[in-house]
Each structure stands twice: as C-alpha cells, then as structure tokens.
C-alpha cells in the first residue's frame, strides 16, 4: 500500500515540477515581480497537496516587506511549506542550486545562495540581503545552518541577522513542525538529517500516510539596540516556545 501510494504521488509531483519549470521558462519573463511571487505561492501550495501533506498556518501571516523571516529547519520541504504560507526569497546554501530540478525551481523563486564555508561570501550575501530588505522584500533564513531532527533546536548562527540590523528591518520568528496525524507526534517521515539522502527523504515523505505541516508565525520584532548575537539568541528562544505550542 505504501509503495502504491508513493508511486501515485511521485507521478503527480513530477508532473507538477515540470509544469513549474515550464512556467518559469515561458511565463515568468512576461510577468511583473508581484505576479511571479503569487505564482510561486500557488505552485508551492499545490506541491504540498501533491505530496500528501496537510498545511496548517497560525499566527500573523506577513503582509508586506521589508521583513526577515527566521525559522527552524527540519527538511527540504521547509522551503516549499514556507512558500505556500507566504512567498519569500530564501537565503540557502549553494548546494541547493545544483540539485536536479529543485535547484532550477529555487532559482526561479528568487533564492539568494551562500557558500557557508566562505566568510567573504557570507559578507557578500549580507550586503545583498540588506539591499533587498531596503527594497521592501520579504527574505527567509534558517539560522541553524542545517536541518535538525525536529525535537530540538540547534544553535543559531548570527551573521545573517546583521542584514536586518543594517537595513533597520523587522524580523519575524516562524516555528515549523511536521506532525504524524494519527499519533500527534513529530513525523519522522519528513526529516532530512545526518547521512540521509535527499531521494530517501523524499521517498519517505511520499510513502507517509497522513502528515500535517504546522507553520506558526510569531510577532515581528526589531533589534531595539541588540547586536546580532543577542538578537539571534532571543529569537531562538521565541521559536522554541512557538514550536512547543504547536
């Protein structure tokens, strides 16, 4: 039964991915940026459904930028789920750009890429982030820097918070949680950690019976004199509390 379900979903997901690639190549050049953003959100919402994942959104959903969304990181699916909740431009590791199919979609959605091992590249991305925020964009980052198991938060890297300080832009904490609907516990099917392969994680997601993605938006906040490290620590505590309340 699981295999049949996974294959059925996989076929629909692949059709949806190729439809998205075609839209990026053919329609996007003729659309205004606001129209592109809306199409990305619509595409992401449909993708979540094609994967068999329910979506529950609570809290104050963003309306407009400038704004930096800060979320915990569990899975490759986080990007799609957050796009479905509200379009934003992600700051992601450069590896994503090389992922088959997904990289092209991420680039089409306006992702900013960073080489995490390079301090110089981090400074470049912070500069571009600050400019994007000044231009009124909504950006999103995963300050843990890698995916966790969904049960605990990893330490937050503070470097990218400098962009919000420089641009004098608010930051909004977001908590993500994937729930096994049958048990109410954290879903193991969605995780992408340690030595797991991307394909293995995707297959588990496709095979899962009922999973719900919870997206909890906290209240936006400004730096109020905090440096990036203090702000990162405070936001980590807020996201931890939001996650526990899911």
Image (cartoon, grey):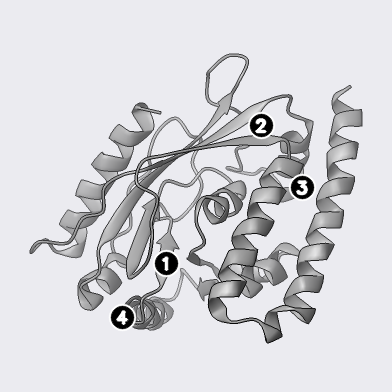
Q: Which residue is mark 2?
A: 189
Could you tell me how many numbered marks the image carries? 4
Residue at screen point 33% across, 58% down? 157
Q: Which residue is mark 4?
A: 134
Nearer mark to the viewer, of 4 and 2: 4
Residue at screen point 64% across, 57% down? 42
Q: Quadrant of the C terminus?
A: top left
Image marks 2 and 3: residues in contact by CB distance under 8 Å = no
Q: Which residue is mark 1?
A: 139
Secondary structure state at the residue bearing disc 3: helix
> Real-space Cα distance between discs 4 and 3?
38 Å
Nearer mark to the viewer, of 4 and 3: 4
Q: Earlier in the sequence, mark 4 or mark 1?
A: 4
Q: Earlier in the sequence, mark 4 or mark 2?
A: 4
Q: Which residue is mark 3?
A: 199
Residue 159 in view in this figure: yes
In the displayed image of the protein, which residue is found farthest to the top?
A: 183
Residue 110 in view in this figure: no
Classed neighbour count for the residue bearing mark 2: other residues with Cα under 10 Å, few (<14), some (14–19), many (≥20): many
Of 187 and 211, nearer the camera is: 211
Nearer mark to the viewer, of 1 and 3: 1
* Residue 122 coordinates in the image, percent (x, y): 39, 76
Secondary structure state at the residue bearing disc 1: strand
Of 102 and 25, nearer the camera is: 25
Residue at screen point 32% across, 70% down? 66
Secondary structure state at the residue bearing disc 4: helix
Secondary structure state at the residue bearing disc 2: loop
Q: Earlier in the sequence, mark 2 or mark 3?
A: 2
> Real-space Cα distance between discs 4 and 1?
11 Å
> Real-space Cα distance between discs 2 and 3?
12 Å
- The answer to which quarter of the image holds residue 104 is bottom right
């Amino acid at each position: 039964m699981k295999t049949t379900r996974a294959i059925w979903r996989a076929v629909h997901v692949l059709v949806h991915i190729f439809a998205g690639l075609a839209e990026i190549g053919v329609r996007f050049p003729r659309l205004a940026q606001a129209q592109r953003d809306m199409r990305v959100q619509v595409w992401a919402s449909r993708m979540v459904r094609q994967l068999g994942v329910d979506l529950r959104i609570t809290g104050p959903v963003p309306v407009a930028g400038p704004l930096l969304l800060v979320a915990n990181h569990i899975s490759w699916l986080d990007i799609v789920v957050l796009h479905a909740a509200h379009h934003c431009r992600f700051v992601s590791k450069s590896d994503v750009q090389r992922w088959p199919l997904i990289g092209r979609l991420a680039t089409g959605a306006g992702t900013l890429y960073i080489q995490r091992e390079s301090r110089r590249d981090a400074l470049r991305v912070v500069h571009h982030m600050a400019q994007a925020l000044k231009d009124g964009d909504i950006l999103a980052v995963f300050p843990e820097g890698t995916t966790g198991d969904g049960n605990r938060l990893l330490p937050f890297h503070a470097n990218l918070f400098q962009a919000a300080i420089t641009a004098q832009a608010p930051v909004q904490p977001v908590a993500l949680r994937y729930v096994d609907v049958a048990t109410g516990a954290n879903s193991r099917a969605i995780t992408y950690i340690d030595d797991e392969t991307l394909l293995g994680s995707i297959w588990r997601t496709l095979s899962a019976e009922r999973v719900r993605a919870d997206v909890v938006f906290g209240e936006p906040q400004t730096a109020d004199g905090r440096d990036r490290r203090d702000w990162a620590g405070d936001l980590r505590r807020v996201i931890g509390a939001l996650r526990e309340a899911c």
